Each structure stands twice: as structure tokens, then as C-alpha cells.
Amino acid sequence: DAGVTQSPTHLIKTRGQQVTLRCSPISGHKSVSWYQQVLGQGPQFIFQYYEKEERGRGNFPDRFSARQFPNYSSELNVNALLLGDSALYLCASRGDLNTEAFFGQGTRLTVV
Amino acid sequence: GQQVMQIPQYQHVQEGEDFTTYCNSSTTLSNIQWYKQRPGGHPVFLIQLVKSGEVKKQKRLTFQFGEAKKNSSLHITATQTTDVGTYFCAALRSNDYKLSFGAGTTVTVRA
């Protein structure tokens, strides 16, 4: 069984550009969450989706948006990139909302 | 929001020794999860605690949920080099199932 897969694994963007990160959850998992992890800190919650509906949003600006598709995969979009957006972006899927989260390997985004 | 604080931030341990890391909240938690992230890796689920006073063991790791469900601890006995990494506690909020992570305890081991 494939785990949570994220693409791309690494990305370098210039300030002001836009980026789209992709996530495929474990087969059968209907919940996808996105986290931002800056070096030396814990993952910070960005979005949660369940059954294609947004179920929660963290304290991030409107430049961050996401969606979940009918096959439960998800995309995270970040517009007008800032240097401070450089981080590891993690996607996690859960079978049910009250169970453990399975994380992908993450996308390492560097904004220059 | 539901915040969890972890102490210590760093733990330097001699191989073979024991140590404990703590997770504290000012509010009552519905449940707490623990994750381990190896250097360069992603968080991996270790355990979930739900009941007041619950204690669970995984080999050399012992997890505890406080009686008031406001704190949790992870105790590792006979530390090995394979225990290196950052240990996170995460609180699962009961109203919207948002999972909020602490800042983690980063463990290094001296051989």
C-alpha cells in the first residue's frame, strides 16, 4: 500500500511567485490536512479537509488556499510568495478525524 | 486555540540513561497523540491517549495522560542511538478535530 505521497519534493521559487503543492492520501482516507514546518519548530496547522469540504483553517493569510478533489487528493496554493514562506510543507491523511495522522515526506519550499 | 507546551526543548542523553519529556496544556484535552520525527524526515505516529490517567507502553517507551487530562509525558528507558529525533505531542480538538502540535523535544544521544 502506498503511503501519503507529496509532490514535488523540493521547490525553489522567487518572491512574488505562486506555488501549488500536491498530496495524495492513503487509499480510503477521506481527511487531508496541511501543515507548515519551519526549521526547529513543530508543524503549524494550515488547512483541514474532510469529504471535500474545508473543516478548519489555521492562522495563515489569505494568500494560502487549498482544495480537495473527488478522489480525496489535495492541493495547497500559495500566492505572492514571501521569503518567510520558506519551510517544509507537510500533508497528512487520516482515516477518520479522530484517528492518527499519516504524514507524507513533505515538500521543501525555498523562496529566494 | 488549544495550545500545548513541551519541555524541555532539547534533551541531551547519555546512551543507556533514561529521560522524560513533558507536554502541558492550560485547557482540558480530549486526547493527545505523540509523534517522532527523525532528522530530515517526517512525523511518524507513536501513540494516542484518550482516557484520564491512561498509561501505554511500547517497548522502552512509556506514555502517560494526566488525571486532569491537561498534561502528558513520554518516558524512555535505556536510551539508544535509534531514539535520536524530535518528539512531538499533538492535541486533538474535539469540536473540529484540528490536530495542534507542540514545539517538540529534540533528543540527541551521546555514545
Image (cartoon, coloured by chain):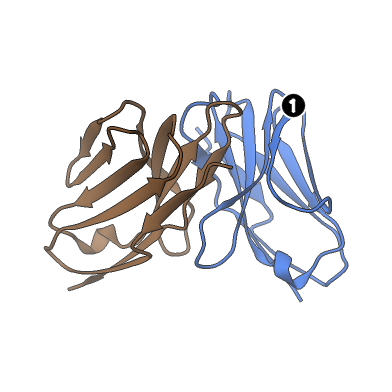
- Chain shaded brown: B
A7 or A110: nearer the viewer = A110
Q: Is residue B42 left or right of residue A30?
A: left
Q: Residue B3: x percent and y percent?
A: 51, 47
Q: Residue B70: x percent and y percent?
A: 37, 39
Q: Residue at x 63, y 35 (%)?
A: A32
Q: Is residue A65 left or right of residue A39?
A: right
Identity of the residue furthest to the bottom in this view: A112
Which amino acid is tagged 1? Lys
Q: Is residue A63 left or right of residue B109?
A: right
B8 or B60: nearer the viewer = B8
In which chain is the residue bearing label 1? Answer: A
Residue under label 1: A52
Q: Residue B19: x percent and y percent?
A: 20, 58
Q: Residue at x 42, y 45 (%)?
A: B25
B49 or A71: nearer the viewer = B49
User: Which image quarter is the N terminus of chain B in?
Assistant: top right
**Vertically, is A35 above or below B31?**
below
**Vertically, is B31 above or below A37?**
above
Please give the count of numbered marks on the rendered protein.
1
Q: Residue A90: x percent and y percent?
A: 60, 50
Q: Residue at x 35, y 34 (%)?
A: B69
Q: Residue at x 45, y 43 (%)?
A: B90
Label 1's element?
A: loop
- Chain shaded blue: A
Query: Does any portion of residue B37 appear in the rendered image?
Result: no
User: Which image quarter is the C terminus of chain B in?
Assistant: bottom left
Which picture quadrant has residue A55? top right
Mark 1, Cα crowd under 10 Å, few <14 / some 14-19 / many 20+, is some
